[in-house]
Image (cartoon, rainbow, N blue to C red):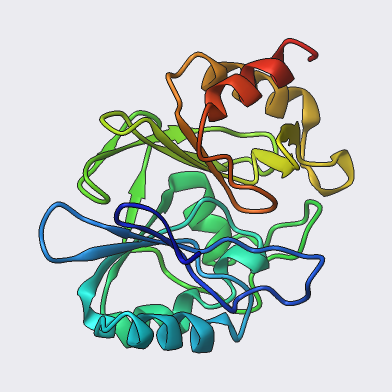
């Protein structure tokens, strides 16, 4: 089911194995252009471009690439996708430095294999003219500059690795992959105050209906 919501595509073929889901989202903008949220592991660009060809989209239809955080399963195909699409890249200002490997990230999880210079570094609360109008929220914990993207009109939350989904239950990312779990709990509580219909996670899920309820059920346990 590639188009999981109107104008929101879950790109097929990017998972490295059946038990490790990596959700790269291709989202329609208000005009004719599209936005890519995260880019998968190195090599995932082949599947992304094949999927775009399948739905009859030229690579240059993607005008913006948003990155939730630095980990290689999110940034591994960033350089290639920027070359193929000529899009502009966006990341939180902390994460942008780590994606450029300046300095190299030494927390849990794999840093990027090669440096990429992010075009636009945002801060918490900045609007991004993409996917119908997004708000970038700094949601640290999993990494220092981890961010989530909220579409208030449709109540969509692209949460990156702030949350995992197991069945219909939202959980925090396991501590062994997280820079600072207490901070991730604070970020989760903040996102729990948003009105969310669809929780669009990167690993597991997504939860297309009452995603906010799943987040609040989690935060009540924290």
Instruction: Between residue 182 and residue 208, name the one nearer to us.
Output: 208
Q: Position of residue 50 (x, y in %)?
A: 44, 88
Where residue 62 appears, x then y in whole percent? 27, 71
Q: Does 185 appear above or below 47?
A: above
Residue at the far left: name it.
Answer: 31
Image point (65%, 19%), residue name:
186
Query: Relative to 139, is 121 on the left or the right?
Result: left
Quadrant holding the C terminus: top right
Residue 170 lies in what quarter of the image?
top right
Q: Based on the displayed image, in which of its 4 quarters is residue 196 positioned?
A: top left
- Which residue is farthest right? 176
Give left or right: position of 82 versus 72.
left
- 109 on left or right of 33: right
| Residue furthest front in the image | 1
| Depicted 94 relative to depicted 27: above or below | above
Q: Residue at the spot x=64%, y=38% of the render?
A: 162
Q: What residue sits 59% from the left and 58% below the top?
A: 70
Judged left or right of residue 27, residue 174 is: right
Q: Residue at x 82, y 49 (%)?
A: 177
């Amino acid at each position: 089911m590639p188009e999981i919501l109107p104008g929101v595509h879950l790109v097929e073929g990017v998972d490295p194995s059946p038990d490790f889901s990596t959700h790269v989202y291709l989202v329609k903008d208000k005009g004719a252009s599209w936005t890519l949220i995260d880019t998968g592991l190195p090599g995932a660009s082949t599947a992304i471009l094949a999927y775009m060809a399948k739905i009859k989209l030229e690579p240059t239809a993607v005008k913006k690439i948003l990155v939730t955080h630095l980990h290689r399963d999110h940034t591994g195909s960033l350089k290639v996708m920027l070359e193929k699409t000529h899009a502009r890249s966006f990341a939180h200002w902390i994460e942008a430095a780590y994606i450029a490997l300046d300095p190299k990230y030494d927390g849990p999880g794999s840093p990027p294999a090669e440096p990429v210079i992010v075009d636009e570094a945002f801060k918490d609360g900045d609007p991004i003219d993409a996917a119908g109008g997004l708000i970038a929220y700094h949601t640290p914990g999993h990494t220092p500059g981890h961010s989530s993207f909220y579409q208030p009109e449709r109540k969509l939350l692209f949460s990156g690795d702030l949350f995992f989904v197991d069945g219909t239950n939202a959980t925090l990312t396991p501590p062994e992959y997280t820079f600072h779990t207490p901070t991730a709990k604070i970020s989760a509580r903040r996102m729990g105050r948003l009105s969310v219909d669809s929780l669009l996670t990167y690993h597991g899920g997504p939860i297309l209906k009452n995603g906010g309820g799943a987040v609040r059920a989690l935060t009540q346990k924290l």
